[in-house]
Image (tube, helix red, strand yellow):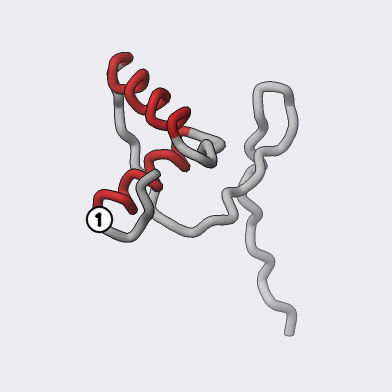
Amino acid sequence: MKKPRLARAPVRLTARGKPRKRNPAPGEPVVVRLQPHELALLDDWMVEQDDIPETRQDAIRRLIAVVCGKGKVK
């Protein structure tokens, strides 16, 4: 007896027509709207770090770890 075939989800494409890659990291996405002065503060903090975070998302994760006592401060 054949198993019923599951329908594939449509492939989402980027603006350039390439397939989007799925984020390999599990987790709950959180959307935060920051004002320009808050982004400037974040960018300034990133530059002050010994090993500069690659992205703002990485910087925000590091700040959360520092505030919650699980990370190191410069």
Nearer the observer, 10 or 58: 58
Nearer the observer, 46 or 24: 46
- In the figure, residue 18 lies in which quadrant? top right
In the picture, measured across the screen, residue 65 lies left or right of residue 52, that is left
Q: Quadrant of the C terminus?
A: top left
- In the figure, residue 71 lies in which quadrant? bottom left
Nearer the observer, 59 or 19: 59
- Vertical placement of 69 versus 40: above or below? below
Question: Residue at coordinates 33% horizontally, 53% vertically from top-left?
Answer: 65
Badge 1 local density, few (<14 within 10 Å), some, or many (20+)? Answer: few
Residue at the far top in the pictured view: 36
- Secondary structure of the residue carrying tag 1 is loop
Q: Which residue is mark 1?
A: 68
Residue 40 in the image: x percent, y percent? 36, 18
Number of numbered discs present? 1
Residue 55 in the image: x percent, y percent? 52, 35
Q: Quadrant of the N terminus?
A: bottom right
- Vertical placement of 52 versus 15: above or below? below
Residue 63 in the image: x percent, y percent? 34, 44
Nearer the observer, 6 or 23: 23
Question: Residue at coordinates 36% horizontally, 28% vertically from top-left?
Answer: 42
- Vertical placement of 48 versus 2: above or below? above
Question: Residue at coordinates 73% horizontally, 27% vertically from top-left?
Answer: 17
Residue 60 in the image: x percent, y percent? 38, 40
Q: Amino acid at mark 1?
A: Cys
Residue at the far left in the pictured view: 68
Question: Residue at coordinates 56% horizontally, 37% vertically from top-left?
Answer: 54
